[in-house]
Amino acid sequence: MKRFLIILLVLLLALTTLVAGCSKKEKPLAKKAAMILSGPVNDGGWNQNAYDGLTALKEKDGFEIAVSENVAQADQINLMRNYANQGFKYIIANGFEYGDAIKTVAAEFPKVTFIQLGGIQHNGTNSDAMLFTSGEAGYAVGTLAGLMTKTNKIGWVGAMDIPSIKADEDNAVAAIKAVNPKATVVSAYVGSWTDVAKGKEAALAQIAQHVDVIIANGDAVNHGVAEAVKGTKVLMVGWSRDQASLAPDNVITSVVQSGAPILLDLVGKGEAGQLKGDLYIMGMAEGAQVLAPFNKIVPQDVQDKVNKVVQDLKDKKITLIPPKS
């Protein structure tokens, strides 16, 4: 009898444990999205575009949001872990430089969805990436610069020498050579997304070498380039947002990469269970990047030629130089 009671108690304990385990449901992640930026939300460029997307998630889809600005590379992993531990459903990192950190943290938090904007880190499960079609914007504005220069010297000022930005420079150079074989290009990378002073210094150095058109692809660094060209006859091409307001007499167009519709689309796919750890490549054909309205100083025949190139890029009629890893 004693043995029977012991066996019965053991069976009841096992059954209780089994029922408790079956009834325990995993707590769903909250409707929360966090964003990690390499620069400030008001840089007038790449980071501000992404932040527009984050605020759109709050305003249009009711997400609770959080943002970390000016994140150093050494802090990326811990910051992502902190957001994951706080129950954020989506962690969005804005830039190519976050790839390694996402790879590490996404493996630790399989229920969290990681989205890399402007990168390629995707893992087939919970890490998706979105990359603008590399090189096409560079080719378009390179065509414009090659047609607008009078000194046949064109400048390129970039933030960081990473594959995505370098691909745009390589294709800008190719386009310049195609429309103006006499033109040469002076290139500078300042090693920062936020150092306005270095942007101005790089632009002034190029102006001293008789550069008369500068393509600026440097987030907040572009503000320094704009300061350098103001009051001169040097023309500027902005990047990521329409930067005409930075130097209205000098900015002839900008590459505009809209963050809100892209992020709304990706998170919408996530909410519908359609994100599967893929890489999404979006460009001019998809409306993900366009040229801002031309400055009135750009002649109509030049505008027509550049618009023709843009259409050819949309139609995949131009072979672009791919990014180098």
Image (tube, grey):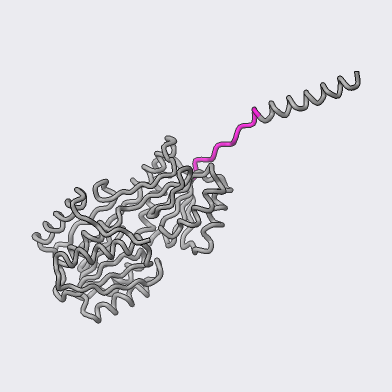
Image-quadrant location for residue 152: bottom left
Vertical side of 271 occupied by 173: above or below: below
- Residue 306 x/y as whole percent: 15, 58
- Residue 295 x/y as whole percent: 17, 62
Side of 58 relative to 152 (left or right): right
Point out the residue furthest to the top here.
1
Q: Quadrant of the N terminus?
A: top right
Residue at left 21%, top 59%?
140
- Residue 74 x/y as whole percent: 53, 64
Residue at left 91%, top 21%?
2
Q: Does residue 245 show up magenta in the picture?
A: no
Image-quadrant location for residue 48: bottom left
- Marker count (numbered): 0
Q: In front: 37, or 99?
A: 99
Point out the residue furthest to the left here.
301
Residue at left 35%, top 48%?
260
Numbered range of the magenta stretch = 22-32
Is residue 44 at least partly visible in the picture?
A: no
Q: Quadrant of the C terminus?
A: bottom left
Is residue 185 at least partly visible in the picture?
A: yes
